[in-house]
Image: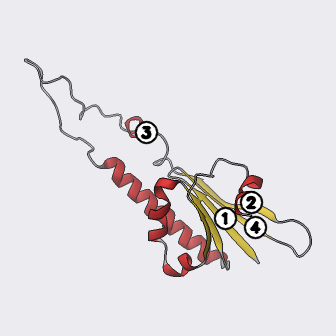
């Protein structure tokens, strides 16, 4: 029987299938991987329009322009990405029909992802590590989940 290991942060999603033959060591293979452009980089790098920027300190003869301010844009983007990640996990775990699976999600989003998982998918979650393991080699990922 195989196990799925998923490593995620807001910018990266990687899913591995781990098979353990009766004789020999476990085999790990990448089954799904994508990068989210929305989750990568700083918000200021994504917004190129200067319309919402303040042109002065509000002193005499200066006008503060506050139109178009992205007050909650970063929070809304984070919520959208977490929802997408949870939906992708739900679909993958159902498709793979594995008995159990493991998750390593960046600490700041780990609990939010777990909350958004469907009950039957959440019930099969065997190990959960609140850490970002998206950039480590797949052999090391296997050792983290033992």
Q: In the rendered image, which residue does mark 3 sit on?
A: 42
Give the quarter of the image for residue 83. bottom left
Q: Pointers 4 and 2 in contact (CB under 8 A)?
A: yes
What residue is rendered at 49% in x and 72% in y? 117
Which element carries disc 4, helix, strand or loop?
A: strand
* Residue 18 location (% of width, % of height): 75, 67
* Residue 19 location (% of width, % of height): 79, 70
Q: Does label 4 or label 2 sit earlier along the sequence?
A: 4
Please say if 20 is above or below 32.
below
Give the spatial CA distance, label 1 vs label 2: 8 Å
What residue is rendered at 12% in x and 21% in y? 62
Give the spatial CA distance, label 4 vs label 1: 7 Å
Q: In the rendered image, which residue does mark 4 sit on?
A: 18
* Residue 41 location (% of width, % of height): 47, 40
Q: Pointers 4 and 1 in contact (CB under 8 A)?
A: yes
Q: In the rendered image, which residue does mark 1 sit on?
A: 5
Give the spatial CA distance, label 1 vs label 3: 28 Å
What residue is rendered at 38% in x and 52% in y? 77
What residue is rendered at 60% in x and 71% in y? 92
């Amino acid at each position: 029987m195989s196990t799925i290991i998923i490593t995620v942060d807001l910018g990266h999603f990687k899913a591995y299938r781990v098979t353990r033959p009766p004789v020999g060591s476990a085999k790990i293979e990448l089954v799904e991987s994508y990068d989210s452009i929305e989750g990568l980089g700083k918000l200021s790098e994504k917004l190129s329009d200067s319309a919402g920027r303040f042109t002065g300190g509000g002193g005499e003869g200066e006008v503060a322009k506050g139109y178009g301010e992205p007050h909650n844009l970063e929070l809304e983007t984070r919520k959208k990405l977490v929802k997408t990640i949870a939906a992708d996990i739900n679909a993958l775990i159902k498709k793979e029909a594995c008995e159990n699976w493991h998750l390593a999600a960046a600490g700041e989003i780990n609990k939010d992802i777990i909350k958004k998982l469907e009950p039957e998918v959440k019930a099969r979650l065997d190990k959960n590590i609140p850490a970002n393991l998206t950039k480590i080699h797949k052999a090391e990922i296997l050792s983290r989940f033992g």
